[in-house]
Amino acid sequence: MFRPVTGPTLWLYILGALAASGVIFFVLQAIPSRLRKPLVALITFVAGLYYATEFFWPVGADGANFLTPWIDPLAQMTQVLQAFALGLGVYSLASVHLRAVARQRSGWGFSVVLFAGLFAIALTGFLREYRPNRFNENVFNFFFVGGLQSLDATMFSIIAFYIVSAAYRAFRVRSIEATILLTSAFVVMLGQVALGQALTNNIPNQQFAANFRVENIANWILTRVNSPALLAVDFGLGIGGLATALRLWLSLERGSYFDKEL
Amino acid sequence: MFDFLTNPGAMRTANVWFAALCTLGLYSILYRENRFFRFFEHLFIGLATGYAVYTTWNDTLRPRWWDPMVAEGRWWWAFALPAGLLFYLIYSRKYSWMSRLIFAVFFGFAAGQAFQGFAAYYFPLVRSAINVPLVPAAGAAAAPGAYALTPMAGVLNNLLFLFIVISVMTYFFFSFEQKGPVAGVARMGRYLLMFAFGAIFGSTVMARMSLLIGRTDFLINDWIRQTVFRLPG
Amino acid sequence: MEHATWPARIVLALFSIIIIGAVLSAQRGRKLFIRRIPGLTAIDEAVGRATEMGRPMLLSVGLGSIDIITLQALAILSSIVQTAARYGNRVLLPVADSAILPVAEDAVREAYTAGGRPDAFHPEDVMFLSDRQFAYAAGVAGLINREQVASMFLFGTFYAEALIMAENGNRVGAIQVAGTPSTTQIPFFIAACDYVIIGDEFYAATAYLTKQPTLLGSLVGQDIVKGILIACIVLGALLLTFGSPVLYNFFQDRDLPLLGYLRQAIEAGGS
């Protein structure tokens, strides 16, 4: 039954699949309310059970078990399903800004700019794809390279200003923890710039004296203090993540979203 | 009328002017939020969303769903469409619960993958944490530039490593009241964390500065010198 | 490691049994303790500030998709929204992933209902901005400045854009509480925010805020597992010091029959 089909019959099969989906939809909407939550819990468990079983089940000489061939198709399916969700975001954006334009709220002109940018790059992208020529390529590049990429690069570079103001504020806090943080940051920064390295350049880079060169101190902080501390944080996060995954898988998670009656 | 759009020189000039205006527009928020920034903010979001629409079709839906279904005849991919549309039932008062079915699949996948994720990522980390011998290595000699208490330097560093790992992990115990020596170790762990975070802060500053240098170089050289004043590069 | 080795099966089974066992034990009514988490005690203060000033609160789950971190972030934010709902505060929640949008909207709606003010929920306040990192940051920065938010809660997966959002929050005088498993962004949150949840405190947050027995029980299980891990590391280091890489080999990527690990350790110890 699950074999590729070609020709006009393909569309019959596709329509048949959609019709079958309709039947499934009607069956689902007939499910009584008290069975909905157990159904969601069952689907969550079965979905997780696949990956858990695939991981734990012994493998053959080829490094695969009977579930392994399904990993790639499932990953593909997940990507496709998530791609369908983009429409939700576009709808959300469009509804907010269309309402602003329709009611001529303050700043509605900016919503027009938003739509102009959206349609301009989407349209030129599709034209570039389906009618490739230099004209379409150049227009697309104008919006992508000249617009989108430069806006990205600008926002990224703006962080430099914010880092300085954040460091200044942290310096004003005057607590032990802020002092430790800034001292460590200062030493590491010094160790990475030529000016900082020049301060201890006349200390020989041999034997015990080498311990007092600023780049060696910075390197020691990064490798001997930073690494084990982050390792420990990572362990805690890993265990916390595993516990959360277990609660989710077994539908033990609590919160207003999970406790809601369906 | 639109011939300039195929002229490489003209297009380069247009791109540079557009990029420069975008740059200055976003930088204006450093002064305060203003209409100039708002214009480019909305343009940014519009361009990003439009590009997402284009790439979602071009890079995901067409090669992974449409082509397999239509060009390769794998008709069963048609089931993906109603499954994907389950997301949209959130907007229906009567059927909104059905959107939880598709999320149940995603939650289940995320949870099921946690086992492999944990083992693949954390087992090597545990090995690296264990690999800290507490006696000097045989034949270890003082290396130039090393902390010349070697061969004890390695042992001291390893002891410090263990102490930091244990004290930081002690800080993250939640289910009992931390009193006495445990509280002291946990407090030490927090201070060591601040040390580590300071190191991350310091090592990132230079990277961010280089991005600013790059952007400033574009404004000064590409835009003002080469495009506005047409000076040679 | 693409498929489990025997040690992986043993370790993961052991950890899972401990955590689930602790959860089930807690559900039977055992009274459990959770230590104070400094950043989370400030939530009431931050919500109160927004109420006093009559300005909205901004929440963000970062850039994550439908994953464990984002779900945990939503759980934390739901708890915060429930507190905010009691005072009728307006909550803005811009999201970066369209797939998360329905979950976020549902979570916030339910939180308002649980807080006794379903009428105070505005669907348009949970909005999609952009899935592109810096477009999202620019949108949030603009939102913060235009709405003059009084408090901000940043929980989830963040990258470089974290500092942009936090600094703009500072500019409008917002009180900020942040928490992320992204350790590389924590220093910037510490510098820019008023209160920061570090590392595993992120996963402990919902237990702290709700005091749910299931979540508290899970924390007990996590603490036991952490203790076991510390013991493994110390014991492993000591064994390695005295020439026996048993535990070191136990956590390796290659699968061996169970006794193979001991044999490997003995052979390595002899060389």
Image (cartoon, rainbow, N blue to C red):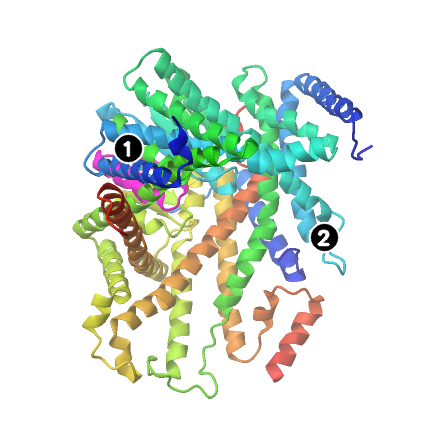
Q: Secondary structure at mark 1?
A: strand
User: What span is colored magenta in the figure?
Assistant: C150-177
Q: Residue C76, image x and y in percent?
A: 42, 36
Name the quadrant of the C terminus of chain C. bottom right
* In this view, C139 is above or below B190: above
Q: On the picture, is A29 further left or further right than B205?
A: right
Q: Please state the horizontal and vertical placement of residue A114, each as a whole percent of the image.
A: 37, 25
Near-viewer residue (C69 or A10): A10
- The amino acid type, in three-letter code, at marker 1 is Ser
Residue drawn at x 56%, y 53% is B118
Q: Is residue C96 visible?
A: no
The residue depicted at 66 percent of the width and 55 percent of the height is C3
Q: Does C269 appear in magenta?
A: no
Q: Secondary structure at mark 2?
A: loop
| The disc label shown at residue C151, or none | 1
Q: Nearer the viewer, residue C260 or B77?
A: B77
Taking B163 as reference, is B69 left or right?
right
Task: Residue under label 2, please give it.
Answer: A57
Give the amino acid at mark 2. Answer: Trp
Rendered view: B125 above or below A256: below
Residue C108 found in image quarter:
top left
